[in-house]
Image (cartoon, rainbow, N blue to C red):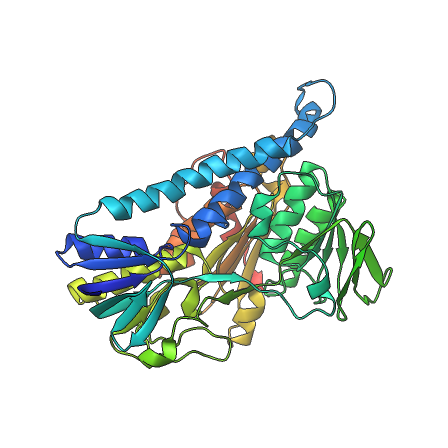
Amino acid sequence: MAHSFDAVVIGTGQSGPALAARLAAAGQRVAIVERGKFGGTCVNNGCIPTKTMVASAYAAHLARRAAEYGVEIGGSVRVDMKRVKARKDEVSGQSNRGVESWMRDTPNITVFQGHARFTGPDTVGVNGEALSAARVFVNVGGRPLVPAIPGVDKVRYLTNVSMMEVDYLPEHLLVVGGSYIGLEFGQMFRRFGSRVTVIEMGPRLIGREDEDTSQTVQDILEREDIEIRLNAKCLSAEKTSSGVTVGVDCQQGSPKVGGSHLLLAVGRTPNTEDLGLAAAGIEVDPRGYIVVDDALRTTNPKVWALGDCNGKGAFTHTSYNDYEIVADNLLHDAGRKVTDRVTAYALYIDPPLGRVGLTEAEAKGAGFQPLVGKRQMTRVGRAVEKSETQGFMKVIVDPDSKRILGAAILGVGGDEVVHTLIDAVYAKLPYTAVQRAVRIHPTVSELIPTVLGELQPA
């Protein structure tokens, strides 16, 4: 059966539903297609469920430290993984159900469930139904990348998706990948009670960050008895009677690491290989990401790509911003562009890392001779009061324009504190405007003016 709409939206991640609702409110007839769970990665196996589990892990960690605060709880701290998972499922499920009911109950939106494939420049097939529209929007997200490690096809492994079904405590979790996903799961399960080893091919953790950030994060994890194996340049996997062995060929330590469970956390790949993109004249880059222009339009002028599948950002907030850009441009001719967006993200270990703009290394690589202000969290009163003094605050400034180029807030509340600097970067304020602002005491944010008053040549 053939159906005609003003717009077809493929996928219900962070940008798809919001865009569908916005277009529907403008009087357009919209079809939205979902092949699996409503809400995409963030709702089902990304931000919401993992941060719910991070909160449970933090509660366990704080309980073990209770005596430091003069609180006696008696006995040992025990984590019930089935209850941890049940709490996670409930929180995630609320969001999943909310997205689905939103789409099904919104006037002018028709929901189709099944796998969508382009059959032409402006036509999409779903379970034998033919959908046509003047505009098509692709929001299909991504999935965990399984690396071509010798032997990986012969062992049982976990990904960030299958980890959502774990309701037990791995005895020894091997985490391949020393970046954002791997480190969050590694610290989380260490706090639940697992022994954890993080295996990273590079010379340091989270290699895109400055070296001082990488080293401090490593120090934080090692203080919790997480083993870190770097320079693992010759990975392999082998099934054993007790679980799995990973060959690492590191420069230091044993050439093999044995564990009970293996988590692969080495990145993600876009869900674009089975969409029939060629039939619609839509190009992808060598990694499979859909090629888009600054307004997120593909090589087919009738099709836009939003979210993880376009390679312009791998975060929930960038996907949502994709929706805002596309909707404002279509409905209000706003002229918004992806390149107007400022890089900002967080790493949700504890304490968290909040990041905006350039790293110090990136600033130097771009030709700046930056000024850098830095303060250890041991010198931040609010952190001392909370006995959470790991990390530091760091701000990078262009001495000529006086603009803030970037910042790293690694410490208690860092994921929230960084937003004051994100706002300053978007507003293109000179750092002196931030430095002279009076802030509330006692907070972590109040020390940002102090950091800016201590700028030194890098």
Which residue is drawn at the image coordinates 51% and 47% (left, top)?
450
Which residue is drawn at the image coordinates 30% and 53% (left, top)?
17
| Quadrant assignment for the C terminus | bottom right
Which residue is drawn at the image coordinates 56% and 46% (left, top)?
164
Task: Report the front residue among 208 and 141.
Answer: 141
Vertical side of 142 occupied by 96: above or below? above
Q: Position of residue 320 (x, y in %)?
A: 35, 56
Q: Position of residue 117 (x, y in %)?
A: 35, 70
Give the residue at the far left of this rendering.
Answer: 27
Task: Report the front residue among 92 and 37.
Answer: 37
- Side (left or right) of 362 relative to 173: left
Q: Quadrant of residue 404?
A: bottom left
Q: Quadrant of residue 22?
A: bottom left
Q: Position of residue 18 (x, y in %)?
A: 28, 53
- Side (left or right) of 160 relative to 318: right
Give the tally of numbered discs.
Answer: 0
Question: Can residue 312 be seen in the rendering of this structure?
Answer: no
| Quadrant assignment for the N terminus | bottom left
Question: Can residue 251 be seen in the rendering of this structure?
Answer: yes
Give the residue at the far right of this rendering.
Answer: 254
Q: Quadrant of residue 168?
A: top right
Q: Position of residue 155 (x, y in %)?
A: 72, 59
